[in-house]
Image (tube, rainbow, N blue to C red):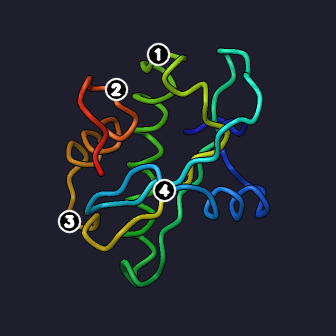
């Protein structure tokens, strides 16, 4: 379960994050980020939001399964095991899920999301 402090709930922050620059895009999702205007303490973690439309799949169970997988990847790989400096410049992160994510495995989602934040020592996926 993703902690409440790490969840993006404010509609205003969602809109500002989506109006900002696209950070990473691949066939499963698009990631938008909102950066801090001033340097923040390295212990500050970003807030994450996940958007998945009914166009991806009409069944709520399928959409919820994808959201649960992404939340677990965020919790385990981005918030716990990632270096704090890697996520420090980001205030908010919004992940918009695409249709191909329905057939994606957990490992595929994990690999591409961690690669977006350059945690596998690879170049970011564009």
- Nearer to us in this view, 103 or 126: 126
Per the image, the residue denoted by label 3 is 103
SS type, badge 3: loop
Which of the two discs, 3 and 2, labels the residue nearer the N terminus?
A: 3
SS type, badge 1: loop
Per the image, the residue denoted by label 2 is 119
Q: Are marks 2 and 4 in contact (CB under 8 Å)?
A: no
Which of the two discs, 4 and 3, labels the residue nearer the N terminus?
A: 4
Viewer-side label of 1, 3: 1
Which of the two discs, 2 and 4, labels the residue nearer the N terminus?
A: 4
Please give the name of the residue rendered at 78% of the width and 57% of the height, measured from the top-left corner: 10
Q: Are marks 1 and 2 in contact (CB under 8 Å)?
A: yes
Q: CA distance from mark 3 to mark 2?
A: 24 Å
Q: CA distance from mark 1 to mark 4?
A: 22 Å
Viewer-side label of 1, 4: 4
Residue 76: image location, x then y, percent: 43, 28
Please give the name of the residue rendered at 48% of the width and 69% of the height, measured from the top-left corner: 52
Per the image, the residue denoted by label 1 is 83
Relative height, residue 62 to residue 92 (above, below): below
Q: Are marks 3 and 2 in contact (CB under 8 Å)?
A: no
Which label is found at residue 102? none
Crowding around mark 3 (Cα neighbors within 10 Å: few <14, some 14 to 19, many 20+) is few
Q: CA distance from mark 1 to mark 3?
A: 30 Å
Crowding around mark 4 (Cα neighbors within 10 Å: few <14, some 14 to 19, many 20+) is some
Relative height, residue 16 to residue 40 (above, below): below
Residue 71: image location, x then y, percent: 48, 45
SS type, badge 4: strand
Viewer-side label of 4, 3: 4
Q: CA distance from mark 2 to mark 4?
A: 18 Å
Quarter location, residue 29: bottom left
Residue 112: image location, x then y, percent: 27, 44
């Amino acid at each position: 379960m993703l902690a409440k402090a790490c969840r993006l709930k404010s509609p205003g922050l969602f809109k500002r994050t989506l109006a900002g620059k696209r950070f990473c895009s691949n066939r499963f999702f698009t990631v938008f980020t909102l950066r801090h205007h001033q340097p923040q303490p390295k212990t500050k973690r970003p807030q994450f939001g996940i958007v998945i439309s009914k166009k991806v799949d009409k069944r709520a169970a399928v959409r919820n399964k994808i959201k649960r997988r992404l939340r677990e990847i965020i919790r385990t790989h981005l918030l716990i095991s990632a270096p704090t400096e890697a996520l420090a410049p980001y205030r908010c992160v919004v992940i918009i899920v695409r249709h191909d994510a329905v057939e994606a495995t957990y490992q595929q989602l994990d690999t591409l999301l961690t690669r977006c934040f350059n945690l596998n020592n690879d170049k970011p996926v564009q």
